Image (cartoon, rainbow, N blue to C red):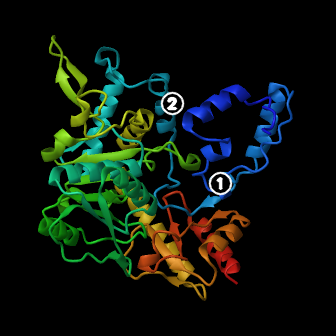
Amino acid sequence: MREPVGHYVPHTDAEIDAMLAALGLSTVDELFAAVPQALRLAGGLDLPPGLSEPDVLARLEELAARNQVSGRDLVCFAGAGAYDHEVPAVTRSLAGRAEFVTAYTPYQAEVAQGVLQALFEFQTMVARLAGVGVANASLYDGASATVEAVNLATSSSGRPSVWISQGVHPHWRQVVTTFAAGEGRDVVEIPLEDGLTAWPDARNGVGAVVAAYPNYLGCLEDLARARRVADDAGAPLVVAFDPVAAGLLRSPGSWGADVVVGEGQAFGTTLNFGGPYLGLFACTEEHVRRLPGRLVGQTVDTEGRTSYVTTLRTREQDIRRERASSNVCTNQTLMAVTAAIQLGWLGTSGLNEVALRCARGARYCRQALLAIEGVEPLVSAPVLREFAIRAPVEGEVLVERLAEEGFLAGVPLGPGLEASGCDGGLLVAVTERRTRDEIDAFAAAFEKAVR
């Protein structure tokens, strides 16, 4: 017999039964069968019915206070696509304006000129970072941007086989594989050797080649090699890049990338326990008609004044469904505007300085950790602002121990990297926010944690 509906659950037993019947399910547990048991809340929130709203809020705040927050409770050395970068007051202030926070999709150009101009500037800056001709007005996150890039590449080549480096973020690869199952694509993961992709000789039938720059382990990949593999296969080259590292490195486009994707969280968006984030997507002009999402363009109105419009939308809602190249309907406008403000504030020299400070901090931190007995580099390939190490203690254990010392130590390397021999290590990142004193204290705590 089902438990009585609680005070804070708005659905009646009859409504729940109707929903389950429509879905062909017997119990609510069956509805959530795909969610691993370890991630499910056991025992509910322990909120007795009849509490007043202030009492409920107080209880929820008490539960939330158990979280250890980066920047407040923990000094952050974690990365892997989400970074603790500085968000200056100007970015917080401008991005928090009501015109941006409350804006919806700018369908009506005549009342959305401000948002459209901000998105146009965002596109321009992303295209320059990527080194290709055009960028769209953003996607959900780096993972969805990678999926859309694979869609574009295989549509262009007409072949469903995808070669993707294991240097691409494991979660992004999982999303690509999930989408590929529905599209009938064959995804082949290319393992790493000593931190770099061991690309095999290309063969006929490959429809897309996907590399990372730097890769998930922080290593600097040889994109010239990836370009040759793509050329030999006659396939587009997709590069998942770190947009902050682009402040120091050659752009992916200069290496011959056809499509460039990335995660834009580093530009003005805090960690936020995982989102919402921002997908960056850029490509050569050759592929503009397959660009997912939307493209904001600049034009003039009937009186000759500069104006902004949505030039291209390729989703199924706007064109014939069978011709649509994407079903992306939300473009994370607020995060894109925030990134435009942050990039505009930094400028070319500012981004270069951020990347340089990250690289110098990472080098100092890496040397300090490798000086600890039993700690060794996981790979020997050159790195920029993120690096992988192996310690006498497993990565998950290190993270738990160092949290007690006030540090978010890094990201344990686990599923998705076994074939490359990199599971069990720890991925450490350093941003421009980390001071020498913080790094020294982290190294001291790390030495204690591995004993």
Return the mark for residue 212.
Answer: none
| Residue 104 in view (yes/no) | yes
Q: Nearer the viewer, mark 1 or mark 2?
A: 1
Where residue 186 sits: x, y (%)? 30, 61
Where residue 299 sits: x, y (%)? 17, 24
Q: Residue at label 1?
A: 39
On screen, residue 36 versus residue 333, left or right, reads right
For the C terminus, the quadrant is bottom right
Tell me what residue is drawn at x 39 percent, y 38 percent.
336
Mark 2 Cα shell of 10 Å, populated few (<14), some (14-19), many (≥20): some
Tell me what residue is drawn at x 21 percent, y 48 percent.
283
**How many numbered circles are shown?**
2
Residue situated in front as seen by the camera: 72 or 331: 331
Badge 1 amino acid: Leu
Where residue 254 sits: x, y (%)? 18, 59
Vertical placement of residue 108 versus 437, above or below: above
**Circles 1 and 2: CB distance less than 8 Å?**
no
Where residue 99 sits: x, y (%)? 45, 22
Return the mark for residue 96.
Answer: 2
| Label 2 SS | loop
